[in-house]
Image (cartoon, rainbow, N blue to C red):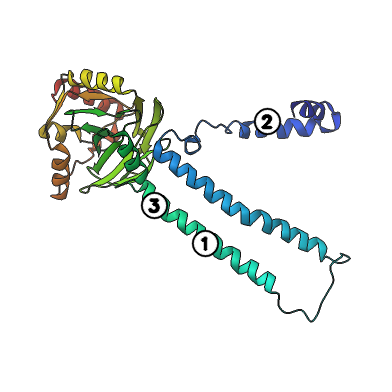
Amino acid sequence: MLLEVQVFIKNKRYRRGAQMVLPPALLTLGGCSNNGLYLLKPEGLISHTFYHYFILDVVIMLLIIVPTTLLTIWAMWRYRKGGKGSYDPAWSHSNAIEAIVWGIPLVTVGVLSYLSVKAIYDVNPYNPGVIAKAQKADGGDPVEVDVIATDWRWLFIYPQQHIASVNQLVVPVGTPVKFRLTSTSVVNDFLIPQLVGMIDVMPGMRTKQALVADKAGTYIGFSADYSGAGLSWMHFQTKAVSAAQFAQWVKSTQQSPQHLSYAGFNRFAKPYIAVGGDQQTFGKVQPGLFDYVIGEVMHGKVWRTPMAMTENMVNYMQKQRAEQKAGDY
């Protein structure tokens, strides 16, 4: 292909046109990268299941689209003026055609309906069948994580270990992870494309999600719903590590001097400029914090965005850091 382009440019007749057309074309091709195609690179049990059904749907639809397209082209060619098709003015009905145009769609809808129902049970966020089977085969206990979306950070609480982390989710490979999710203010969408699909995170409510990471690595997670000025800051790292590394991370996090109480969370939940994806850990979390947040929001608790945050972001960021160092969350 490159050789053909070089020959094209060397031809004096086309050189001027090439100089005008190729630079914009090359700039356009600069966006053709597979780095962001997370949905096509599944690394978790749920995401693999999504991908499996996605491929099945595409193949089934292609089995209809491709033959239909070819038959349409064939009919247009055969029955064109001067073609080999014969004209029959008395023709009015064909059992074969009726069987095809009604039978194939009915079979297709039936197959797709079956796959849709099966997929719903396999990846149901509240009780995913594929994870239930994996957990039954493994026999291990799942890791529980409470997720709280604030403006504009993610807080991950591990109630079994009494720890928490900000903008970083750490999970053991091959172990089911079960989430409870809520928000302090507006609706967010929790999404880790390579591990699990999207689920709403709603204020004053609790939703559920689950995943199993098949492979160690670091995966991007983010909010997939507009939640105000700081939406673009709501990225978090998901680190899938071995069971031994997870136990080591839990132990080191438990030694963090920062603690998170109910009162501390009320300071933490204030709108926060997290441009750099600030990460921190809490070595001790007050029990029941997740339920406390839901109850506070249900009773009208609001963490308002101060005007100073948008008027002078640099000064406000400096103020945030000073308060963070001085306060014991």
Q: Which residue is drawn at 34% across and 28% down?
A: 275
The answer for how far apart the CA atoms under marks 2 and 1 are is 47 Å
Q: Between disc 3 and disc 1, whose residue precedes?
A: 1
Q: Which amino acid does label 3 sit on?
A: Ile
**Residue 129 visible in this rendered orientation of the protein:** yes
Q: Where is residue 219 in the image (x, y as percent from the top left)?
A: 40, 29
Q: How crowded is mark 3: few (under 14 residues within 10 Å), some or many (20 or more)?
A: few
Q: How crowded is mark 1: few (under 14 residues within 10 Å), some or many (20 or more)?
A: few
Badge 2 marks a residue whose secondary structure is helix
Quadrant including the N terminus? top right
- According to the picture, the residue beneath numbered tag 1 turns out to be 109
Q: Where is residue 276 in the image (x, y as percent from the top left)?
A: 34, 25
Q: Which residue is drawn at 48% across and 42% down?
A: 51
Q: Answer left or right for 316 relative to 216.
A: left
Q: How crowded is mark 2: few (under 14 residues within 10 Å), some or many (20 or more)?
A: few
Q: Between disc 2 and disc 1, whose residue precedes?
A: 2
The answer for how far apart the CA atoms under marks 3 and 2 are is 47 Å
Q: What residue type is labelled 1?
A: Val
Q: Residue 23 carries which label?
A: 2
Tell me whether the residue at label 3 lies in contact with that at label 2, contact meaning CB atoms closer than 8 angstroms: no
- According to the picture, the residue beneath numbered tag 3 turns out to be 120
Q: Nearer the viewer, residue 301 or 145?
A: 145
Q: Nearer the viewer, residue 50 or 180?
A: 50
The answer for how far apart the CA atoms under marks 3 and 1 are is 16 Å
Quadrant including the C terminus? top left
Badge 3 marks a residue whose secondary structure is helix
Residue lying furthest right in this view? 82
Q: Where is residue 13 in the image (x, y as percent from the top left)?
A: 85, 32
